Amino acid sequence: MTPDPRPTPTVPPPPTRLRPAGDQRSATSYTRYARARVVEAQRTIDSHTTSAYTGCCLGCGRPGPCADLTEAETTMHRYHRLPFRRPGATLLDPSRVADAPDRPRFSWLSRSA
């Protein structure tokens, strides 16, 4: 039998790209920057939760989701993160008396007019 005249196929090794030290430092500083932005956005989301009872922001008292909450959620979306939500954070306080007047529910209406 005669040997195969074709050359032996060889797969070249994948190219290796060496990153300069400056490039690596900028990636690290960007990671710190992004982490700080995400942590700050999570703090804002925790403090500016919209109450299920009154419909007002618990942080600033404005009706509906306030601009701070919307901006924080946009930041979380930009960095592909989901905000950590505490179950029951928007519900009533269990120690609340049931016979109390229902004025807080519509207090945002008088403030918005």
Image: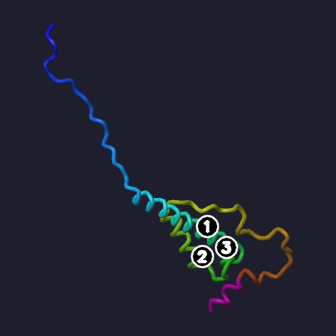
Going from the N terminus, do you reach mark 3 or mark 1 first? 1
Q: Which residue is under mark 2?
A: 65
* Amino acid carrying mark 2 in the image: Pro
For the residues marked 3 and 1, what is the alpha-carbon distance in whole angstroms? 9 Å
Give yes or no for residue 74 being in the magenta stretch.
Answer: no
Q: Identify the mark at residue 47; answer none if there is no mark.
A: 3
Magenta extent: 106-113
* Amino acid carrying mark 1 in the image: Gln
Q: What secondary structure do most residues of the magenta stretch adopt?
A: helix
Image position of 30 with respect to 108: above or below = above
Residue 55, how many percent across, how many down? 66, 77
Left or right: 16 as drawn, with respect to 86: left
Give yes or no for residue 110 being in the magenta stretch.
Answer: yes
Disc nearest the viewer among 2 and 1: 1
For the residues marked 2 and 1, what is the alpha-carbon distance in whole angstroms? 15 Å
Q: Secondary structure at mark 2?
A: loop
